[in-house]
Amino acid sequence: MTKAIYALFAGTSLLLFFLVFTNTQKINIKANKWFSGFIACIFFIAFDNFLYEINILRNHFILNLIDTFCFFAIAPFFYFSVIYFTNPQKKWKFKNYFHFLIPLLAVILFIAFYFMDDFEETFKKGNFINNTIELVLISLLLTQLLLYPIFSYLKLLQHKKNTYLFSSNIEKIDLKWLQYVCLSIVIMIFCWSFEIILNISEPIQNIVSPIVDTVYLLGIFFITYNWSKQTEIYPFFSIQSIHEVIEQNEESNQKKKKLIDDKELLDYKNKLLQLMDQKKLFLDNELNLEKLAQELDTSTHTLSYIINNGFNENFYQFVNRYRIEEAKELIQKSDHLSLLGIGFEVGFNSKTTFNTTFKKNTGKTPSEYKKMSSDL
């Protein structure tokens, strides 16, 4: 059973690596290169375990060397994929190499141990944790495998928060699929740690291992499914201008720095209100900060400042407030449109977002609001 599971696990991860690396849609290119490194690590670990199970090339130097590197590099690879998903223009800095010091150290120690006379005994399964250096490395590995997904998840939460500054529909760009991948990785790490602890008890291990291996297989299926749902994160935006808006927002939260004077802010505010009322730009379900800035004939960071300081809202809240008001009117007047149809008509991309935003703004769901309106 375990052999079959590892064969499927290795085969699936190899196929996923091929899909991610080739990236035929050419989206999020830098991020997917790092993500392909993450998947490659999964493949080599799974492949090595499969070879161990079928008793082939158990102590092959090159395979064990790659396996050692992959164990310690898998977490940094994933972390940097998250960084480049959230910021494609991120420049590589010398300090980033330090994330791969532990994998390098592990490889050096492996090479040193390999040429020791008692290599077979030192690396014998069952004595794995008994060796002091191995214990230190395992501790470092577990620390890496726990901390990097946490840091990655926090970055993804910050990215989602930032999307409210420049997009009116965030479902396709909030990287929720990558948050799910983070959670699945944590579950797989927990299972792997649990298996290491139970490795000292062979009878229990024989029962638990197939279950844990099945979790690994389901995990790679889950990662594959979620990866396939990704879209270009910044499809319509000037990435540089968006990050200027994000930086400006962070600075304003700290210093409340004035970008324009109060009179100019009031003029822009009135002009924006007139623009939204007359042209109803909010009906465009792909409306973003850059599009609206062009209509207002100003820069994205100036528009962001106007919305944040003139209306005490972010871009997402500002646009969707207009959409909800339009939806309320349609609910009261339109008989030929369903509630979902109204949601799409006013600019929302999904039923869930429409219902959630409607309730947040009115205190009622669209169906509750419709019933209340019909009762009046």
Image (tube, grey):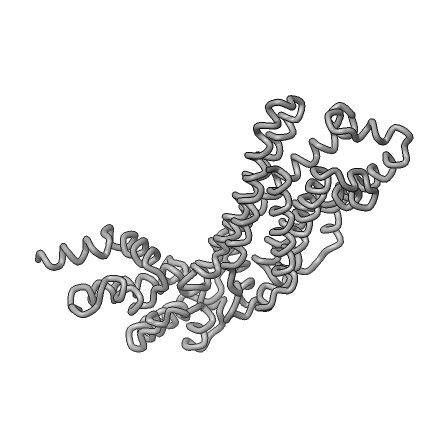
Q: Nearer the viewer, residue 232 or 311?
A: 232
Q: Position of residue 237 (x, y in %)?
A: 52, 69
Q: Please tell me whether residue 373 is drawn above or below residue 42 in the rendered image.
A: below
Q: Nearer the viewer, residue 306 or 222?
A: 222
The C terminus - image quarter: bottom left
Report the side of 52 relative to 231 (left or right): right
Report the side of 351 relative to 58 (left or right): left
Q: Please tell me whether residue 282 is drawn above or below residue 134 in the rendered image.
A: below
Q: Position of residue 165 (x, y in %)?
A: 45, 60
Q: Nearer the viewer, residue 341 or 270?
A: 341
Q: Residue at x 35, y 57 (%)?
A: 353
- Spot the residue most to the left: 376
Q: Residue at x 41, y 59 (%)?
A: 314
Q: Position of residue 324 (x, y in %)?
A: 27, 62
Q: Position of residue 66 (x, y in %)?
A: 77, 46
Report the side of 179 relative to 372 (left or right): right
Q: Please tell me whether residue 332 is drawn above or below residue 220 in the rendered image.
A: below
Residue 59 picture quarter: top right
Q: Please tell me whether residue 123 is drawn above or below residue 329 in the rendered image.
A: above
Q: How many marks?
A: 0
Q: Can residue 72 be seen in the rendering of this structure?
A: no
Q: Nearer the viewer, residue 176 or 164?
A: 176
Q: Can residue 276 be seen in the rendering of this structure?
A: yes
The N terminus - image quarter: top right
Q: Residue at x 48, y 57 (%)?
A: 174
